[in-house]
């Protein structure tokens, strides 16, 4: 096995999710965030549509986004389903993260490319970013909760109807190393050689 494969294998196998409340509030240099976005930009893409888009929130804009997200939840949730603790969670979700990034796909002008392939390409871009973060010792969380997939989130972000939010990424540093990884289903049960 060569060194490059060993390095890539190590990063893939050790990447873990760190929930934002476990982050420590230390700021990531914006230059490193740009490096991660450059890695994201090298995702595979059918027809060279490059559908991935990112909205980066840091400093005061991060707190504003979290407040808008929480208020969106409050406004759009029926009274009988509304949970004040969920509002508070969304409001403070980014408090200890350095950057919050909304990842979405911008539907391209090639209708022959299926939406599923655009979702896959954008997901690959997100994975590139998360793997790069792991290699730099940056904790990450790919969130899909709250109002991430609600149509009003797209309105809030001024996205087009055909665009799709794929998640909210929280990046920061954490004091404690992530837990050991595991797989519940053996690889042999997931692969069939024909």
Image (spheres, rainbow, N blue to C red):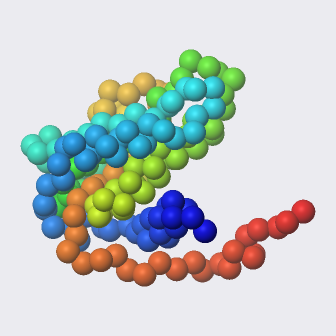
- Does residue 101 appear to the left or right of 26 in the view shown? right
Please identify the quadrant where the N terminus is shown: bottom right
Q: Residue at x 69, y 23 (%)?
A: 112
Q: Position of residue 39 (x, y in %)?
A: 41, 43
In the image, residue 165 sits, relative to residue 143, either above or below, namely above
Can residue 78 be seen at all in this image of the molecule?
no
Residue 179: percent from left, percent from top = 38, 80
Q: Residue furthest top?
A: 109
State whether residue 79 is above or below residue 193. Answer: above
Q: Quadrant of residue 30?
A: top left
Residue 14: quadrant of the picture: bottom left
| Coordinates of residue 117 in the picture (x, y in percent) | 63, 38
Q: For this rendering, which residue is in front, 61 or 48?
A: 48
137, 159: nearer the viewer: 137
Which residue reaches farthest right?
194
Q: Is residue 73 above or below residue 152?
A: below
Q: Which residue is at the front of the view, 71 or 5?
A: 5
The C terminus, quarter of image: bottom right
């Amino acid at each position: 096995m060569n060194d490059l494969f060993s390095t890539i294998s190590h990063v893939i196998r050790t990447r873990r999710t760190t929930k934002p409340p476990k982050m420590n509030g230390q700021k990531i240099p914006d230059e490193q965030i740009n490096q991660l976005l450059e890695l994201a930009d090298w995702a595979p893409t059918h027809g060279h549509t490059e559908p991935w888009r990112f909205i980066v929130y840091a400093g005061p804009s991060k707190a504003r986004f979290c407040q808008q997200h929480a208020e969106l939840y409050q406004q759009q949730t029926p009274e009988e389903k509304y949970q004040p603790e969920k509002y508070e969670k969304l409001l403070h979700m980014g408090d200890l993260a350095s950057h919050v990034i909304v990842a979405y796909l911008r539907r391209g002008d090639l209708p022959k490319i299926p939406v599923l392939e655009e979702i896959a390409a954008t997901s690959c871009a997100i994975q590139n970013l998360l793997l790069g973060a792991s290699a730099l010792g940056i904790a990450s969380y790919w969130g899909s909760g709250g109002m991430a997939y609600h149509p009003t989130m797209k309105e809030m972000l001024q996205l087009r109807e055909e665009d799709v939010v794929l998640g909210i990424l929280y990046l920061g540093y954490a004091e404690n190393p992530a837990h050991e990884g595991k797989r519940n289903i053996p690889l042999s049960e997931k692969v069939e050689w024909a």
